[in-house]
Image (cartoon, rainbow, N blue to C red):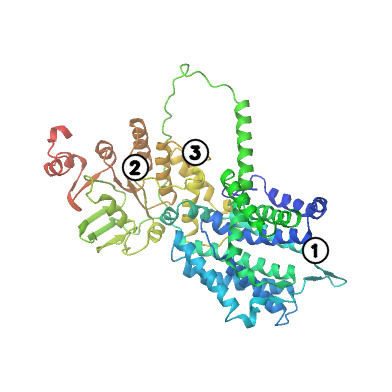
Amino acid sequence: MNANRLGQTGRPLLVELLTIAGLVAVPFVLPLFGAAPNTVNRILVWGLFGIGFDILFGYTGLLSFGQSALYGTGGMFSAYLLTKAGFPHVVTALLLGMVVAAVVGYLVGLVALRRTGIYFAMITVAIAEVFFFLEFNPLSEWTGGENGLPGVPFPSLHLGFATIEFESGWKLYPFLAFCFFVGIVIALRIVRSPVGAVFRAIRENPQRAAAVGHSVHAYKLCAFVIAAAYAGLAGGLLGVMQGFMPPDAFMFETSGELIIQTAIGGIGTLFGPLVGAAVWLFLQDFLQATLNLGATWKLVLGVVFVLLVCFLRKGIIGGLGDLYRLATRRKAQSLAPPAPARDAVRPVPAPVRRVAATAPRRRTQHAGPILKVTGLSKHYGGVVANEDIDFTVNAGELRGIIGPNGAGKSTFFKMLTCEVPPTSGSIEFDGRDITGMSVTQACQLGLTKSYQVNQLFNQLTARENITIAALARKRGTFRIDMLRALWNIPGLREQVDHTLDLVNLAGRADTPVAELAYGEKRRLEVGLALASDPTLLLLDEPLAGMSPRERVETVQLLKSIAQGRTMIIIDHDMDSLFELVERVTVLQEGRILVEGTPDDIKGSADVQEAYLGGVHAEAMA
């Protein structure tokens, strides 16, 4: 049931078919165990509510404590239409409540998403409290205040020759089950779409998602609106199910129960909230009705929740998934032929696979300089990182940058890719002034870099990492194609496979990043930059931390991908760097000390003094 893999299509519609089978079986099976129909209906409502929250938190990494505000807003609006306004169509009222909740979610998201992490969560807490106050005080004339809105009608289906009334209990179950099924099908389409892939990237590493060309804020807002729409529909169904829209839908406790249920069932699974709600509500009924614990049931459920979180950190569905993978792995190991003795075969390093590099798709509009920097400076208070740098790189050139630690190389790179704004000066790329642009905009124009410290999507596979970067190249910074299959994007699969070949990771494409060797991770870091098909590629210490063998392999890799590209490389391994580049720029104390060919730099007395502390030219030759 876990749809974590990008564009999962191995068994199309299997999850949907199993869901239908389960929903059909419920009214026949659960009554045998004494399940009350109202409890089952409440589970469906909470499960639908939780689908949106799981997309927001489990897939995008945004923990919101304010979902009760949107749950209550959608429910109250639908209930108001059906009671005080006399609106006759229940289903239409539910859809209008969902739309209103989505609109409110958009407005709330504009405020809440101005901050990240714990500050985002605290803003959502405050917003929930504001909505709770408004419902009980200024808006009580419309919401009923502490009395809520009674008299919400049940839905009905007019077939022309007959009318089906969905009343309380098991008679209402088919309607709620249908709503849940439609909700889960749409959610599955979303998480398998390009939008869902970007959601997961943002959860794993929002900074890198922005650096490869995605508008992180826009996608976060999109996830927030999706969660709000699900909350609004679930709130409307709550009123329909009970015949009464309760004011406690706005309470903070509602958000807390939603989070707990999702954690119990399994975060990032879509079905986790449904399973968690079943555990929560069945235990609640059992503890209250069967054991007659009264208010003590909350204490017992709290202990159960703590135990589940401690021993099943991925929730019930996540734990079952781990058991299945463990059993599959052990079965595969038992069927595999025995490994040869260590001394029998000496491991041979795999050669770097050479693949003909295609020229970048983006073409410069003119010959000559592709990058021109004028008077570029960066000050952090009284600390000068870079000062008055003039720097030019021609199209097709391979440029190296060296300098001692603290020379300002990394800060210079960050300004070139628009990660940090310069204090003064200008940056012109491909005939366009990009000073002040965002890193996302710069990447979309064709300027990107690999990082000195790996910035990967660690819970995804190598293929999925490359896919995230290629999606930005194919789709732009933001696109709402939520119901489109990921691999239906023309040329995406070819771009991903080609990039994996370029960085010699085709054989490890479906390996999680956490299981890759360090050298493989460094190649994947370069692959993320290559997948966006840059006009100008910046590599920040691509050889850092590698063993001698890995360095040799990576130098061969860089030579192969340099064909037809413009590249700027920073590295401390001067021997390897001089082997790769045509010209070298030396930075010292944030300024350009000298520029020239590798031979010029080797023989420069200034470089020997500043960079190597006065080592003679003979030592560098």
Most distant residue in the top direction: 344
C-alpha distance separating marks 2 and 1: 64 Å
Check if mark 3's residue and mark 1's residue have beta carbons within 8 Å.
no
Q: Can residue 376 be seen at all in this image of the molecule?
A: yes
Horizontal side, residue 350 vs residue 261: left or right:
left
Say how many tags the image has: 3
Q: Can residue 192 be seen at all in this image of the molecule?
A: no
Q: Residue at x 50, y 49 (%)?
A: 467
What SS does tag 3 mark? helix
| Image quarter (top left, top right, bottom left or bottom right) of the C terminus | top left
Q: Residue at x 61, y 30 (%)?
A: 330
Tell me if residue 136 comes above or below residue 374 in the rendering: below
Residue for badge 1:
169
Query: 418 and 63: which one is in front?
Result: 63
Horizontal side, residue 385 vs residue 187: left or right:
left
Q: As shown in the figure, which amino acid type bears the numbered disc 2?
A: Pro
Q: As shown in the figure, which amino acid type bears the numbered disc 1?
A: Gly
Query: 111 and 608: which one is in front?
Result: 111
Q: Position of residue 424 (x, y in %)?
A: 24, 64
What SS does tag 2 mark? loop
Q: Position of residue 483 (x, y in %)?
A: 61, 59
Mark closer to the chain start, 2 or 3: 3
> Which of label 3 and label 1 is nearer to you?
1
Residue for badge 2:
542
Residue for badge 3:
506
